[in-house]
Amino acid sequence: MTRPSVTAVVPAHARPEELRRVIRAIRDQDYDGALDVVVVFDRAEPDLSLVEEGERPVRVLENTRTPGLAGARNTGVLAAEGELVAFCDDDDYWLAHKLDRQVTLVELDPAAVMVSSGIFIDNHGRSTPRTTSTPYATHAMLRRSRLSMLHSSTFVFRRQALIHDIGLVDEGLPGSQSEDWDLLLRASTLHPVLVVVEPLVTVTWGQKSFFRHDWPTKIASNQYLLEKHDDVRKDRVGAARLMGKIAFAQACLGQRGAAWQWAARTVLADPRQWRGPLAAAAAVHPRVGRTVLDTLNKRGRGV
C-alpha cells in the first residue's frame, strides 16, 4: 500500500549551519513514502544553494505573506504538495524514525487531523526528554495546559484539514508566539491530537532563541490568546495559567504594579497557579525570577 506523501515545511531566518542539519535530518528519514522539503526564508535572502532535485527534493521559497514565523509557515503550507504537512523549525532536528512512527498513527485513524510526539530539549548540550503519558491530547486537556512537549517541530497535519478545517497559522498573533498552542487548541476541537509518547525531535534551547527574553511580545501574545479563545478565558484554570505568564513577564520588565495586578488576578482565578506568587516575588526581587527561570530552563521547562 502506498503511504501518504509528506511535505516538510521549514521557516528559515539566520541560522545557516543549523538549517543544513535540519534539512539533512528530514531527508534522512527512514519513512518509505514520498517526502519533499520546502524551506521558506523570512526577512532573509533565500539561499538557493539549498535546492536539491531527485527523490527527496528541496525547494527554496521566500515568505510572501505576513513577515514572521506564521506567514512563513503558511507560505510553505500553501506551496506544499504532500497529503501531509510536517513542521520543523530551523534549529531543531528529527530523529530518523519520526515520520514513520507518526504517519503510522494517522493511517490507523482516518478521522485524525494531526499528530505530535514527545521531544528531547537540548539546552547547551544538556538533553532532557519531555513526553506525555497519554497517546492523545483532548481539547479539555489543552485548554488548561500548554503541554509544551507537543512542540511545533513535532507537528504533522493532514494538509487539507489544516487549510480548510483547522485554519492556517494565525498571522495576527504577536511575534507568532504560542502559535503552536493556538493550532493545538483549534485542531483538538475537531479530533483529539494523536501523540507518539516517545521523543522524536530534538528541540534546541539557548541563547540563539529569537524570543527567549522578549517580554513585551510574550505579554502581548498571551493577552491576545486570552481574548481569542473564549473557552480558555472562561476556564479558571486555563485563564490563570495565561494570566500568571503575563504577570511574570511584567515582573521581568520591572513593571511592579502591573505584575502585582496580574498576579492578583491569577491567584483569584486559581489559587493553585504557582506563576502568580512567583511573579509577585519577582516584582520585588528580580533575581528570584531569573533564578527560577534559569533553573527551569536547565530542566527543559519554562515559566
Image (spheres, helix red, strand yellow):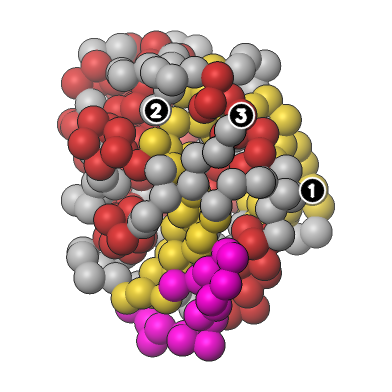
Which residue does the image show at 73% across and 43% down from the upper left? Answer: 97
Up the image or down, 135 lies above or below 73; here it is: above
Q: How many marks?
A: 3
Query: Which circle, 3 or 2, is nearer the viewer?
Result: 3
Badge 2 is on which residue?
113
Cα separation between marks 3 and 2: 13 Å
Residue 202: image x %, image y %?
A: 69, 50
Up the image or down, 273 lies above or below 259; here it is: above
Up the image or down, 149 lies above or below 204; here it is: above
Q: Nearer the viewer, residue 174 or 274?
A: 174
Observer able to see residue 296: no
Numbered disc 2: secondary structure: loop
Q: Amino acid at mark 3?
A: Thr
**The N terminus, quarter of image:** top right
Question: On the picture, is 161 further left or further right than 206?
Answer: left
Q: Nearer the viewer, residue 227 or 285?
A: 227
Badge 1 is on which residue?
127
Rate crowding at label 1 as few (under 14), some (14 to 19) or many (20 or more) other CA atoms within 10 Å. Answer: some
Work out whether mark 3 precedes mark 2 in sequence or the reverse, and give the earlier one: 3
Work out whether mark 1 precedes mark 2 in sequence or the reverse, and give the earlier one: 2
- Magenta range: 43-59
Quadrant of the rendered image containing residue 269: top left
Badge 3 is on which residue?
104
Question: On the picture, is 289 further left or further right than 266?
Answer: right
Cα separation between marks 1 and 2: 30 Å
Rate crowding at label 3 as few (under 14), some (14 to 19) or many (20 or more) other CA atoms within 10 Å. Answer: few
Q: Amino acid at mark 1?
A: Ser
Residue 257: image x %, image y %?
A: 30, 41
Q: Amino acid at mark 2?
A: Val
